[in-house]
Amino acid sequence: MSKPVVLVLHGPSGVGKDTVIDRLRQRTGIHRATSSTSRPPRPGEIDGKHYHFYSREEFERKRAAGEFAESAIVYGDWKGLERREIEEPLRKGQDVIIRTDVQGARTWRRKLEGAVFVALVARDRETLKARLIGRGSEDPESLARRLAEVDAELADVENNHYVVYNEEGQVDAAVEDLIRIIEKERCNPERPMPRLLDVE
C-alpha cells in the first residue's frame, strides 16, 4: 500500500537545499512545510512563501494552544513549524518536505514517526567552503560559524536513511535521487505512516 512520505532534508550552508527543493517541487508537487516566525518580514520576503509571519503575541498564543510541532527562540525571535504544515497535506495523501539543519533533524527524529531523513551534502568540505566564499555574503565571523556548521552536518551523515550528493551544476541529478527515494519509501512496508508524536 502506498503511504505519503515526510522527507526531512538537511545539509550545511552552501549545499543548495533551497534550489534542490524548488526543483523537486516543480517536478513532483511535494508540499514544502513553511516555518513561522515572530520577526517582521525582510525586504522581498512574502508571507506564506518564505515564512508565516506573526506578531510575537500571536505566535505565543498559537504556541500555547498547541498549534506548533516544534518551536524555539532563535536570535531573539520565535521560530517554529505549525502542525498543520505536516498534518493537512498528509490527510490528503500528499508528500511533505521539511527543510532544516542538523539540530532540527535531531528534534524531528524524536517528534516525527515514520519520517525519512536525508542528508544533502557536497563531495567534500573544500567544495562547500568555496561555495560559501563564492556567495560573497559572509563576513569572516559568519563564515567561520558556517564552516563549523558544515563539520557538524558532515559528522551527522551516518544518522540518516539516505545521503544525496548535490554536485556543482548537477541539481537535476540530486532531484532524481530524491524522487527515487520518495517512490521507494511510499511502498516501504517497514515504514510506519508518518505522524507527529506528542513529546517535548
Image (cartoon, helix red, strand yellow):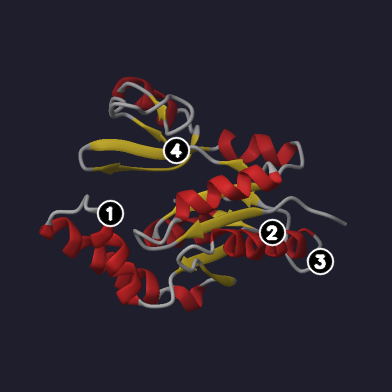
Residue designated by label 1: 135
Report if the CB atoms under discs 1 and 3 are less than 8 Å apart.
Answer: no
Q: Which residue sits furthest left?
A: 140
Given this view, does label 4 or label 1 mark the residue nearer the observer?
Answer: 1
* Observer-nearest of 145 and 22: 22
Ranked by sequence position, the earlier of labels 3 and 4 is 4
Mark 2 crowd level (few <14, some 14–19, many ≥20, 10 Å Cα): some
Report if the CB atoms under discs 4 and 1 are less than 8 Å apart.
Answer: no
Q: Amino acid at mark 3?
A: Pro
Ranked by sequence position, the earlier of labels 1 and 2 is 1
At 42% from the left edge and 73% from the top edge, which residue is drawn?
156
Residue 157 in sight: yes
Residue 189: give its label: 3
Residue 55: give its label: none
Ranked by sequence position, the earlier of labels 1 and 3 is 1
Residue 35: give its label: 4
Ranked by sequence position, the earlier of labels 4 and 2 is 4
Local secondary structure at mark 3: loop
Location of residue 114 by image quarter: bottom right
Residue designated by label 2: 179
Q: Amino acid at mark 1?
A: Arg
Local secondary structure at mark 2: helix
